[in-house]
Image (cartoon, grey):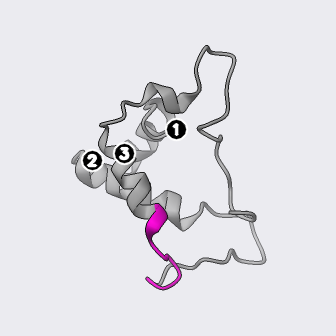
Amino acid sequence: MGQFIEGVDRQQALLLPECLDDYVNENNPVRAIDAFVDMLSLAELGFQASPAATGQPGYHPGVMLRIYLYGYLNQIQSSRRLERECGRNLELI
């Protein structure tokens, strides 16, 4: 994911006693979403896998697909609500 906007590594230990990934239950559906998107070949599905040469870097298509699938499973249809969830919900961080 070199030239896209990158988030925090969920495996990285923080000042908190545990890493963020430890706060999400092993049976949480976001784990299935993560595994599903990881096994997809996004370029073969028509997603633009290489970033544009100009302008601010965009978010990786895999990250956007994860957020969209999370919203679909949780009946969140508004992009503004999804944005709020990304900022406050540990499942999406």
Which mark, by number, is residue 76?
2
Question: Which residue is outermost to the right?
Answer: 54
Disc 2 residue type (three-letter): Ile
- For label 2, the SS is loop
Which is more foreground, mark 2 or mark 3? 3
Crowding at mark 3 (Cα within 10 Å: few <14, some 14-19, many 20+): some
Q: Determine the residue positioned at 64% across, 46% down.
A: 7
- For label 1, the SS is loop
Question: CA separation, marks 2 and 3?
Answer: 14 Å
Q: Determine the residue positioned at 69% across, 17% down.
A: 15
Does the magenta-highlighted stretch encompass residue 70?
Answer: no
Crowding at mark 2 (Cα within 10 Å: few <14, some 14-19, many 20+): some
Which mark, by number, is residue 30?
3
Q: Is residue 16 left or right of residue 21?
A: right
Find residue 22 and report its horizontal and vertical position in percent.
Answer: 49, 27
Mark sitting earlier along the chain (1/2): 2
Magenta stretch, main secondary structure class: loop
Task: Determine whether label 1 and label 3 are within 8 Å by CB.
Answer: no
Of 83 and 92, which appears nearest the observer?
A: 92
The span picked out in magenta is: 38-45
Q: Is residue 87 left or right of residue 32?
A: right
Disc 1 residue type (three-letter): Ile
